[in-house]
Image: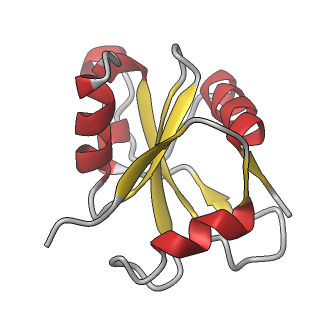
Amino acid sequence: MPYLIEIIKEKKNKKYLEKFLDKPFKEMVKFVADVEKEIIAVGGELHSDIAELLIKNNSNPKNLWGGNFYPLMNNNDWVEYNSLINLKPNQNHFNMDIQDKETIDKINKIIKQFVQNE
């Protein structure tokens, strides 16, 4: 069963992400950010499905990094930087967790641009 995946094109609040809950994850919404184009897409079952949508919209896979939102959490730990698509051996990144602070900073900038933590 395909699940809704959406490229966020305008500022939303964290509550907006709740429409993706239970589709399929009860408390989590997956995201993929393009750190070059500064866009983000959310939803779906697999980060690779979100990445595929972004690639169809001219994103380069090397610039795509995945993670998870937990929109029901009320603290600053509502974002997790963990995904299989983060394994990028050709970029010397061998971990599902994003290790590079600069990459995390770029993702946080994109998140702040499109998803307010309120």
Measuring 69% from the left and 79% from the top, which residue is drawn there?
72
**Residue 39, x across and y down, in percent:** 54, 28
Between 14 and 109, the one nearer to me in the picture: 14
Asked where in the image residue 93 lies, by quadrant, the reply is top left
Height in image: 6 above or below 92?
below
x and y percentages locating residue 117 in the rendered image: 81, 58
Tell me residue 95's x, y (percent). Answer: 39, 42
**Residue at image coords 13%, 73%:** 1
Q: Quadrant of the C terminus?
A: bottom right
In x, y percent, where is residue 100?
60, 28
Residue 79 visible here: yes
* Residue 98 drawn above or below residue 68: above
Depth check: 104 or 20 in front? 20
**What is the quadrant of residue 23 in the picture?**
bottom left
Count all numbered tags in the image, as a single digit: 0
Horizontal side, residue 116 vs residue 71: left or right: right
Residue 20 shown left or right of residue 69 in the figure: left
23 on left or right of 28: left
Q: Is residue 87 visible in this depiction of the protein? A: no
